[in-house]
Image: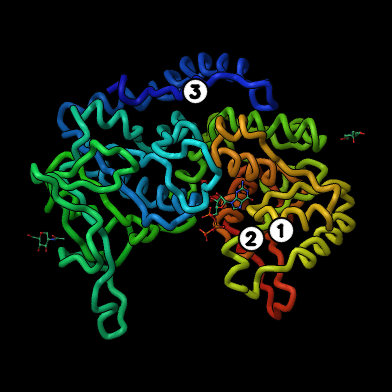
Amino acid sequence: MAQRVVHVPVIFIAAHGSFVASLWSFLLAFAVFETVNADDVFSASHTAMAQTAAARDLRYLLYDVNPPEGFNLRRDVYIRMASLVKGLRKSGDDWVLVLPPWGRLYHWQSPDIHQVRIPWGEFFSLTSLQANVPVIEYEEFIAENGGPFIDQVLVLQNYAEGWTDGKWEEKVDERPCIEKLMYSKDKQGYYRGWFWGYEQTRARNVMCISAQGHASIMAPVLQKNITVTSVMLDRAETLLHDYYAGKDYWDTRRSMVFAKHLRLIGDDFRAKYLNSTDEKDQTIYSEDWTRMKAKLGSAKGGPYLGVHLRRKDFIWGHREDVPSLKGAVKKMHSLMKKHKLDKVFVATDADEEELKELKRLLPDMVRFEPSIEDLELLKDGGVAIIDQWICAHARFFIGTSVSTFSFRIHEEREILGFDPKTTYNRFCGDTEKECEQPTHWKIVF
Ligand SMILES: Nc1nc2c(ncn2[C@@H]2O[C@H](COP(=O)(O)OP(=O)(O)OP(=O)(O)O)[C@@H](O)[C@H]2O)c(=O)[nH]1
Ligand SMILES: *[C@@H]1O[C@H](CO)[C@@H](O)[C@H](O)[C@H]1NC(C)=O
Ligand SMILES: *[C@@H]1O[C@H](CO)[C@@H](O)[C@H](O)[C@H]1NC(C)=O
């Protein structure tokens, strides 16, 4: 058990003469530090699990999400799955959550870089995740399981008939597949599918399950109906949060600590270009999320305006809650004046043409723009996290309407202890009449 839980994400990559690479030797030194730390952090849970392990069968929950969903909704689905596994562990078997490798995301289009089969350790601190619920990387699952075989895939779907008599009730049933099955049988009778880009992976059995309700409605099915060792829930986003923004939600959310190398790169960037350090800005961070209990209003933040300006598909649909570039820049100027900030950091997915226009309208904006070498190291997911980390440390933040990318920044700022007035702000569309601002979700400790 002990060997399974302690996993140290060491990243071996050749250094290039770049901003990121200059930090690399330091990061490798840190990897050694985390090895030691990992043991400390989890020694308590090792003992607790070792005691019961003998009486309980080890079982694995795997999951995947509808392919078009983005990075930040996937982070949300993780919270639902962690909650399910916690519930399963309370009664019965010794369930472990297998982290679905990252890759093939619609938004991750940086050319010529390898963006598939990315382990969670490249983006998140595994020791932090493990302090919340037992998790392992997919490749560890293959090793422990004795091969790339998943016993049972359950493809989740809604009910073909919708809500009967317009009444919503929680239910789950085995049903014929509604959509075309994304798995097909090979000559040996195994099911082949995407499986995060692992071509050798196959499933012994696949069936469709209509589910309507919270993640925990799957618990009885996984405990009683299905008894095999490894079960994968595909289309896991079908299940809802058990208690959105409740204690369990926040425990899991707080455990999703960004990988140390990404935080360090973000911190270095803040110090270098934004005159922002944790001491001055009162944003001291604890590596151990269980001790991170900053009071609301205690964080001051760096002397800059943080902006998340979501573009691409958000403007293609001509949504009325998303501003023009001109409108957004006007708002930024007025916020900088109001809060006496002379710097603005902009995180955006704008395409090249829009970016050019934005640079023309806002020549002094600060952006995190990695070189191609850095991008190879960080990947689009790492750059997105660094953008979020820098926005999370700004004295004042404004994001984009109903963007999960912006929502995750709100949560990060809540964890850091910012006054909600500085966090729950969004741009309004140029002609939007009622511009409702985002909801404040308070941490439940
Ligand atoms: N680096 C960076 N990437 C961004 C930014 N905004 C969007 N992206 C990319 O585009 C993706 C947006 O998808 P999501 O993360 O799901 O967030 P969302 O804004 O709710 O988008 P939808 O899921 O499409 O509604 C992100 O994961 C990033 O890959 C940004 O400011 N900086
Ligand atoms: C689980 O088993 C029970 C009892 O046999 C049955 O009534 C139910 O339909 C099953 N549920 C699923 C999702 O297979
Ligand atoms: C950085 O911030 C400090 C105050 O926190 C200020 O005294 C100093 O002048 C700033 N430096 C620059 C280069 O703006």
Above or below, 258 against 308 in this view is above
Residue 186 % position (x, y): 13, 46
For badge 3, the amino acid type reads Ile
Q: Which mark is residue 107?
A: none
Identify the residue at horizontal 70%, vertical 37% (top origin): 283
Q: Earlier in the sequence, mark 1 or mark 3?
A: 3
Q: Nearer the viewer, mark 2 or mark 1?
A: 1
**For the residue carrying disc 2, how many other residues have a C-alpha within 10 Å: few (<14), some (14-19), or many (20+)?**
some
Residue visible at 42% across and 41% down in the picture: 102
Could you say where residue 163 lies in the image, as x and y percent from the top left?
Answer: 29, 78
Q: Earlier in the sequence, mark 2 or mark 1?
A: 2
Above/below status of 289 relative to 37: below
Write down the quadrant of residue 357 in the picture.
bottom right
Label 1, secondary structure: give it: helix
Q: CA distance from mark 1 to mark 3?
A: 34 Å
The residue where tag 1 is placed is 354
Instruction: Identify residue for label 2.
Output: 311
How far separated are the C-alphas under marks 2 and 1? 9 Å
Looking at the picture, how far across and down is residue 9, in whole percent?
Answer: 45, 24
Number of other residues with Cα within 10 Å of mark 1, as a class: few under 14, some 14 to 19, many 20 or more:
some
Q: Which mark is residue 11?
A: 3
Of marks 3 and 2, which one's residue comes earlier in the chain? 3
